[in-house]
């Protein structure tokens, strides 16, 4: 198939890195909430929680105001001030900042080169007498080393908060990642696979932990104006839940489309020198919130930034998730050792996310592949 053939009718359309879609049914549900005058956390939030828990195979789900709020509450419930938590250095800021917000100290660990997930061997070397938790991330919707994390946690009695902010629909051995103990935390930010604009969810199989999280979510209030402990205002509204319920109904179809688009890109880009394609761990199902490649400038002949500029000129938006590892963030400069974590630093220089969302047509996906193919020609097979 030639580049001209694959360009098709999508050739002049700008292709965004994300597409936010709110259905007419979701809009109608929001309007009904607005007309009811019952806007705060209520019956629709409870419905959303119940449906989400059922969808991921968890016993309990607690809706909150953001993915960051989910992570913060989980750590407040699971650690004590001064405790240390093992955190991958290559992740979004909230994975680390939530530990700090809860009074803990993030101990940064390097990550695996292929998928960017926490390197369990490196994390094991960093366990100390104050280490009580670990914060594995299912980065980009790919599943981390679940067995390795669980084994390390068992060895040292660590609490686990699985950061599933990007992992809606991701599975490990046929089970959704939201079913794992101790907690999994999701984000419903505007560009996530499920969105409520802002919002989050915590899943757990522990009834006492679920009860504590609900208490923390709303000012530590045991009954009206009776507060038994310090809590927060991290409630979701029924307006947001009205959107989330509809989004959840579309999750399976959405993830199938993402996986289908990823398959096309994998097939087209597999022979290009200097590109590392997304990693799918054996026994897992990647949900492709992002389709993130790595660009080795020595082999590809071009840098990540040069490829991004080339695609932008063709109307194809890209993004860098993430350009600076956590141990190089200014806020953590005085929080502990800042030695080199070479894999995290390399990924920050090489990763580039391409459009993958379900609203891309087949012509769009072929156009993206062809644009990369033009810039980094395939190896000669002669």
Image (tube, rainbow, N blue to C red):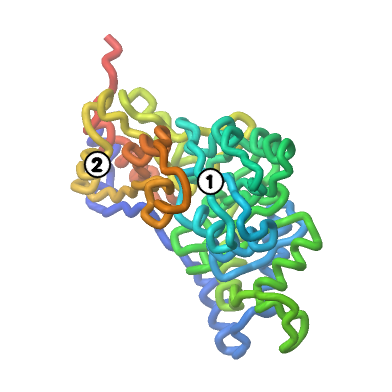
Disc 1: CA contacts within 10 A as few (<14), some (14-19) or many (>=20)? many
State the residue at coordinates (64%, 51%). 161
41 up-or-down from 66: above or below: below
Where is residue 198 shown, x and y percent of the image? 50, 68
Measured Cα–Cα span from mark 1 to mark 2: 30 Å
Front-most of 250 and 99? 99
**Given the current orientation, which residue lies at the most extreme right position?**
207
Secondary structure at badge 1 equals: strand
State the residue at coordinates (39%, 43%). 362
Q: Which residue is mark 2?
A: 305
User: Residue 107 shows which numbered tag?
Assistant: 1
Secondary structure at badge 2 equals: helix
Q: Quadrant of the C terminus?
A: top left
Where is residue 216 shown, x and y percent of the image? 68, 71
Where is residue 296 shown, x and y percent of the image? 31, 29
State the residue at coordinates (52%, 51%). 166
- Residue 2 in view here: no
- Residue 178 in view here: yes
- Residue 375 left/right relative to 354: left
Disc 2: CA contacts within 10 A as few (<14), some (14-19) or many (>=20)? some
Where is residue 308 shown, x and y percent of the image? 25, 43
Q: Quadrant of the N terminus?
A: top left
Q: Earlier in the sequence, mark 1 or mark 2?
A: 1
Front-most of 159 and 65? 159
2 up-or-down from 97: above or below: above
The image quadrant that residue 151 belongs to is: top right
Give the foreground label among 1 and 2.
Answer: 1
42 up-or-down from 179: above or below: below
State the residue at coordinates (63%, 58%). 75
């Amino acid at each position: 198939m030639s580049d001209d053939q694959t360009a098709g009718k999508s050739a002049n359309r700008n292709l965004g890195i994300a597409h936010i879609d709110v259905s007419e049914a979701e809009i109608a549900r929001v309007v009904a909430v607005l007309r009811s005058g019952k806007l705060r956390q209520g019956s629709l939030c409870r419905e959303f929680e119940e449906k989400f828990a059922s969808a991921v195979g968890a016993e309990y789900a607690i809706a909150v105001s953001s993915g960051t709020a989910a992570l913060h509450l989980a750590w407040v419930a699971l650690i004590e001030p001064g405790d240390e938590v093992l955190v991958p250095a290559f992740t979004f800021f909230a994975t680390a900042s939530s530990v700090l917000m809860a009074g803990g100290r993030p101990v940064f660990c390097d990550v695996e080169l292929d998928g960017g997930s926490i390197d369990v061997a490196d994390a094991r070397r960093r366990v100390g007498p104050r280490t009580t938790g670990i914060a594995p991330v299912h980065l980009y919707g790919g599943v981390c080393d679940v067995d390795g994390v669980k084994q390390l946690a068992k060895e040292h009695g660590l609490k686990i908060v699985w950061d599933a902010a990007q992992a809606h629909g991701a599975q490990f051995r046929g089970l959704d990642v939201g079913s794992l103990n101790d907690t999994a935390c999701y984000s419903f930010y505007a560009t996530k696979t499920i969105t409520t604009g802002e919002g989050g969810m915590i899943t757990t199989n522990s009834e006492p932990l679920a009860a504590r999280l609900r208490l923390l979510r709303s000012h530590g209030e045991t009954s009206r104006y009776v507060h038994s402990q310090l809590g927060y205002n991290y409630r979701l509204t029924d307006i947001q839940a009205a959107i989330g319920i509809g989004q959840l109904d579309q999750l399976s179809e959405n993830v199938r489309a993402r996986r289908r688009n990823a398959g096309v890109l994998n097939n087209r880009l597999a022979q290009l020198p200097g590109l590392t394609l997304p990693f799918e761990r054996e026994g897992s199902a990647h949900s492709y919130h992002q389709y993130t490649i790595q660009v080795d400038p020595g082999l590809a002949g071009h840098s990540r930034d040069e490829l991004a500029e080339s695609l932008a000129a063709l109307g194809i938006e890209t993004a860098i998730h993430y350009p600076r590892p956590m141990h190089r963030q200014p806020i953590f400069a005085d929080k502990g050792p800042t030695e080199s974590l070479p894999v995290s630093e390399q990924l920050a220089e090489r990763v580039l996310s391409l459009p993958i969302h379900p609203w891309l047509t087949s012509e769009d996906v072929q156009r993206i592949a062809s644009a990369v193919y033009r810039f980094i020609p395939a190896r000669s097979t002669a």
